[in-house]
Amino acid sequence: MTSTKFRFIILTGIIALTAARTNAQDLYAAQRQSWLKKAEEYKPVLTETIKHPTGIVKLEKDAAAFQGWKMVPAGRVEQFYNTPINQKNTGMIVDFGEHMTGYCTFTLKTLRGDMDSPLRLKLTFGEVPAELATPFDPYPGGLSRAWLQDETVTVSVLPSTVTIPRRVAFRYVKIEWLGSSSGFEFGFTDLHFKASTSVTVTPPELAATTSPIIKDIDRVGLATLKECMQTVYEDGPKRDRRLWIGDTYLESLANLYSFKNDGLTKRCLYLLAGLSNEDGILNADVFEDPEPHAQKTHLLDYCFLYNVALKEYVAATGDKQTGLDLWPVAKKQLDIAKMYTGEDGMMDYVKAGKEWWVFFDWKDGLDKQAPLQGITIYTLNQTYALAKLLGKENEVTEIPAMAKKLKEAAHKNLYDKTTGLFVSGPNKQVSYGGQAWMILSGVASKAEAQKALKALPTVADAVHPGAPYMYHYYIAALIESGLKTEAKAALVDYWGGMVKKGADTFWEVYDPADEFKSPYNFFPVNSYCHAWSCTPVYFIRKYPEIFQQ
Amino acid sequence: MTSTKFRFIILTGIIALTAARTNAQDLYAAQRQSWLKKAEEYKPVLTETIKHPTGIVKLEKDAAAFQGWKMVPAGRVEQFYNTPINQKNTGMIVDFGEHMTGYCTFTLKTLRGDMDSPLRLKLTFGEVPAELATPFDPYPGGLSRAWLQDETVTVSVLPSTVTIPRRVAFRYVKIEWLGSSSGFEFGFTDLHFKASTSVTVTPPELAATTSPIIKDIDRVGLATLKECMQTVYEDGPKRDRRLWIGDTYLESLANLYSFKNDGLTKRCLYLLAGLSNEDGILNADVFEDPEPHAQKTHLLDYCFLYNVALKEYVAATGDKQTGLDLWPVAKKQLDIAKMYTGEDGMMDYVKAGKEWWVFFDWKDGLDKQAPLQGITIYTLNQTYALAKLLGKENEVTEIPAMAKKLKEAAHKNLYDKTTGLFVSGPNKQVSYGGQAWMILSGVASKAEAQKALKALPTVADAVHPGAPYMYHYYIAALIESGLKTEAKAALVDYWGGMVKKGADTFWEVYDPADEFKSPYNFFPVNSYCHAWSCTPVYFIRKYPEIFQQ
């Protein structure tokens, strides 16, 4: 998940949910404090590793390469050290061989002559090659220019060891000379990186029978997840570097089948709960610094996914105590479902869309009716499953009937028997997202699900997923429908496409037809290591019979 | 003094002076170590003062203002704090009301909304208004671009207190917004500066009778000197921030009559001696960091001026011990005079100019014959005066005859009886510098001196001083010749011109006819607080009968 230029922080719905301050609210304030305290207790100590460059590379224009640029080897790393950096020898790119997150430190020394003036260098850290081939200014992007990782440094005396104050995430660093005196030469004697992650274990190897492309996808997915696992599940270590519910849900799924850092999931669930609003409704994303605080972003589908994430965590770990602690939060999110459910069992997606940010995907024009109806049913079912795990069914006795009502209404109103596809909204839009959520919610029977998913590729104007995030739910729906071959093919096609294009980590946005696609109007500000893209790890490892054969 | 794009580090002459390593040289190496140790002992502890802005200003184009720009008040400083800095409100300039040298620290905080991204700011520190009105890039200057004081800062979390790592020298700081997220506002809650100097005393007031313009010149001169007095006499706190013999000589003169920090002069004399070459010849400039070391710059006239500075120091302070310690250094510089003196008593300025950097002034086309002949005689005389102070005449018995020979030869070869002017070189160039050095050396009789100096302004193609450094010697020559009115008028005209143009400190380069003059092809990289421009302090305070009436 990520921030947007335009935020939909529409509080109308929330205000309606908010009653006058009561003793119950005082109690809730105290609960939030205790949740924050627990979140702090489970804050992981990061594993820090010193990394060194692996070589010198140079940019080469190549129409066949991702975004038109590739890196080609240009020298051994030994050639980088003690090479004079000057007006003629500028723009050198150093490759660390892998995506990393942390802090860059370098040492410069005089190679020849007297340092007659300060020197000035620019270091640009890039996750992908084209990021270093594209001028950043004038900046056309919709997000802050400051996300771009170019830092200018002035050094007055050599030798000097400099640490770039900001944390960066990258594989390549471009070093540009911006000034020094003539008759004087300087160079790098050291360049290293303190890489951090809260991952501490190496997951088991995949089955030997696994195809090379699946192995590659798994490897890149693990790298993506590892990089995003810091002191919270970040959405992206370059950008936005924060805890979003939607990303956390997918990261925690992948983590269950790989790094098994259950403490981190627990911390994130507590942190989100501790930073919920006074009325108990969750915020979609939170920051850790300077002290834990929420960005006041009301994103409907993410509130629901909190319940799902909590259920998955409790089910997988058996940690009922956390489930019981946070059960009030999950229960509270159900109010949102109740608020927008009409007499006819259909969610009032128009009203909800006015009062909330209803996200689902980075995809302009995606109609939200079917996805919203589906995720609501899914959430009701998952929350009830959580209640059962915790012995709390008696507190949510209304759920089964409500879920049934919404499910029947959905089938009645959104299923087109003629085409065998689910439609959404006034224009009866057919979308991957709509099918996925109708299937995951159980609205579609297995037969209907298979029919819909098989028909989808033949629908000319079907709305495709816009980002890996929605692709996750599409793959999940294929698996849910028993379309194993199709699930594997779709995963290999989409994530394998990134691998074939040289991805070290999976990207925030990937449209095979438009490599420059950016929700922010400038592809270099996209995140190229993004949490919500890591879920092949989950699929491949949860379903070895599908992916590891 | 300052660095140049092209250095004349021609060692031929030096090599000729260098004999094989001997016991004497081992002894000299030990002496140098002991001098460096003494220099370290006298290193002053800087006085640090926290300074705060005095107001907001804005740039206004004004053809009548220095370099075409002036600052006009634009608000009280209270209006600066907590004002949102963003795309619309960028380029704010904060005035500290005085020139300062040291370290800038500021604190930013969130004013509204969530900090959704890092923010990016540029701070540009300027000594004079036009420096902040002129784009730095593409940089056309001959010196390192890194001298320019613009620093870009990325801040990831607020509140944040940032100290710009490099030392800066400035009065105005321009703050430019380069990026932050929309729907979020931040501002400064604090901006302060840790200003440093090794000055600890306030010099006495000038006589009440002193004219306002002289008082102003003295005030600006004191500010200039104070700013340049750090742990050495720097040439300029913005640029080049190092100890040059020529600047040190003039600073130490001004210091004798104002701040009386004799320890600093002593330190600088020892430091220069300690960093002399193996053969005893001085380097023109030295650095303190990372450890004391010389820039291997062989500047003939500066070697000579070391002797003059030492003599002035001993004469004024009575510190014979330092004089005796450093006497071997002074004696050694005389070798340079001996090396280039011909049978006819004339210095071989052509050969010297090939083997050394012979400086005298930032003035293209200045012929060096007369100045070199003059400074050599002056140095011989001053060194002999030093010998007498130290009881060492017996070691330099050859000086009086040699000085006499050079003086007579100068008068014979360089004095044009018809015009009453001294000429220089094959084209018989008439220059201010030539007259000044013929007079200071005593080649000209008082009557001849007066005649020459009075005639100078009528000579259409006379080569004028290029910078305040040469102006110093011109004023000194006027005083030496008894032309008191003219000395005062020239000082008021030249330094008063800077004062009238708004100088807070005196400039490295000032040509009333060309305010954009720069030895480095880009006026913003000029130093606008430059040691060699501070000497009005010396003249005004040493000669109250001339300047304080």
Image: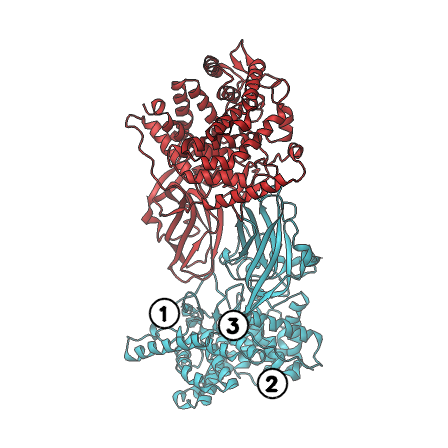
Chain colours: A cyan, B red
- Note whether A12 is above or below B514 in the view shown: below
User: What residue is at 62 percent from the left and 84 percent from the top?
Assistant: A482
Q: Are marks 1 and 2 on the same chain?
A: yes
Which amino acid type corresponds to the residue marked 3 in the rendered image?
Asp
- Closer-to-camera residue (B257/B312): B312
- Note whether B233 is above or below A423 in the view shown: above
- Closer-to-camera residue (A396/A26): A26
Answer with mark 1 or mark 2, whichever residue precedes in sequence: 1
- Note whether B282 is above or below A60 in the view shown: above
Q: Are marks 1 and 3 on the same chain?
A: yes
Q: Which residue is mark 3?
A: A247
Q: How many marks?
A: 3
Query: Residue A202, position in %: x, y?
Result: 61, 77
- Closer-to-camera residue (A12/B127): B127
**Distance in Å between CA atoms under marks 1 and 2:** 41 Å
Give the label on residue A447, or none: 2
Query: Residue B28, position in %: x, y?
Result: 58, 40
> Quadrant of the image for the C terminus of chain B?
top left
Q: Nearer the viewer, mark 3 or mark 2?
A: 3
User: What residue is at 43 percent from the left and 55 percent from the top?
Assistant: B162
Answer with mark 1 or mark 3, whichever residue precedes in sequence: 1
Q: In this rendering, does residue B533 appear at all?
A: no
Q: Under tag 3, what secondary structure? A: helix
Q: Nearer the viewer, mark 1 or mark 2?
A: 1
User: What residue is at 45 percent from the left and 87 percent from the top?
Assistant: A320
Q: Which residue is mark 1?
A: A12
Query: Residue A504, position in %: x, y?
Result: 63, 67
